[in-house]
Amino acid sequence: MRMVVDAQGNPWHNDSERRADINRGVNAAHACMAFQCEICWMRNLENRDPTREDLPYVQCIRRANLDAITGMSRATVNSHRLETLTTVRNAAGLNKTPSLHERGPFPLADQLGMGTAVDMLEKSRKAKGRNEEHIQYATMRRGRSTASRSYQTSPAGVAEAASFAKGAYRVRPTNCPTQSDWFVSFLLGAQARMGHKTRTNKAVPIEVMVKLLGYVARDALAMEMDGEKAAANELWKMGAYYCTLTAGSLRSNEGFFLELAGMNQHLPQGRDGAMPAGFQLKTNRLLTEEECRKLPHVAICLLGKFKGGVGYDHHIINVASVSMSGLRSRWWLEKLMEVCRVEGRCNGPAFATPDGRLASSIDYNAVFRRYLKEVQRTTDLIPEDEDVDEHYSIYRTPRRTALNRAKRAGVKEPHLSEMNRWSREEGAGTKRVCRSMSAHYTDAVMMMPTTWLYSYAL
């Protein structure tokens, strides 16, 4: 559903009010923003007056001005208007010149970013979107980043680049037009006018994932019996992929980081683990390292370029061999390793073709949705009227499913955040640059109070 709010997040009462607000100016807005008419802007941008052929250009300038006005609070504009009138009236009583700055003329240049605003609006008018016929605001605003980078690498921007600041952030003054207050107001107004329409992946009950994996195993076994070994192997890999995403609370691209050498090295560890007598899921109790080593678990070994890292690095997540709902992570990962050995692969990406090429996420997603539809058709776990293609995919559905299940099982912060932000440098306790795999595994054991409890709760 399209968001219908003003720049401050307040809902418009009806569509006609919304249309009126985004298509008209505000009295005295020029008193508190850098406003210029279309003719002045054309002179600033092109050093000439507009002609009949410039009508689309002029319309974009007008739209940018209106968006900049919409991006300001009308109450704030009115407050500045009243204060300005009071200042002028009081100054007249004193026979004094009002201490207000001249409203123009502006220099013959684009100091505010109007040129970039016009480029962005023209893109929003012509480009085709994925969810709608037009692009979304999030796509349109990328033009600002490109324009800012262009300025920073220009002679003027390079001259500003030197800076020094103590702390985590880099601060430097700049004359970049896209960093102006006017441009910020334009972005706020454009966002309020365009709104948002996204296709957010939904979670499914964890029982859906267990049932889906059961169907995958059923069909893979049937293919093997029919002599379709290659097709069966592909299906086994897909099942292991869906299980890995869910158990590790991973996004789709992160699952493809699973690496064979690390998996082969650490697969035996945790196989003979046993649940302690009378064990109960207590997320507020910190497990010791020795207790973690004795738990039944399996290592998910990822290799890739992670955020905050330098070059390629390993990351290991130890998860429960079997979850409370029956998600058999160890069984699926051992089956995956068996299939890869049959294909003659012992290193490189686990989810790959027999010749080692990385598997296609499009194919994995299509099969995932196909089995979700079968679960929908054969059970009441997914509503009959739910559009599977619209709301579910490998990108976030397994991850959201895991998160929802863990919350219902009683897993609390900081375990939820630590498990779902593992790729952030400050949260990646099991990621270290230039260290041996055994050292990584030791770190992974230390993280098991989070990773094992989270995955066991599924």
Image (cartoon, rainbow, N blue to C red):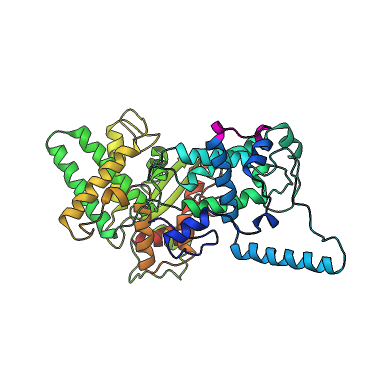
Please identify the quarter of the rendering in which residue 26 is found.
bottom right
Toward the viewer: 315 or 408?
408
Instruction: Answer whether residue 447 is visible to the viewer in this image.
Output: no
Callout count: 0
Q: Residue at x 60, y 54 (%)?
A: 69
Q: Position of residue 79 (x, y in %)?
A: 67, 66
Q: In the depicted view, which residue is nearer to us: 354 or 127?
A: 127
Whether residue 349 appears in this view of the structure is yes
Q: Is residue 310 magenta?
A: no
Query: Percent from the top left, x then y, of residue 139?
Result: 48, 43
Magenta-tinted stretch: 45-54
Residue drawn at x 62%, y 42% as measured from the top left: 38
Q: Is residue 135 left or right of residue 330?
A: right
> Residue drawn 73% across and 65% down?
85
Residue furthest right as drawn: 95
Position of residue 89 in the picture relative to residue 276 (left or right): right
Asked whether 277 or 72 is in front, the reply is 72
Q: Nearer the viewer, residue 138 or 423?
A: 138
Q: Position of residue 277 (x, y in %)?
A: 33, 69
- Name the residue: 21% across, 38% down: 232
Say which quadrant the N terminus sits in. bottom left
Eyeballing the image, is 255 above or below 280?
A: above
Left or right position of 284 against 245: right
Considering the image in quadrants, where does the C terminus appear?
bottom left
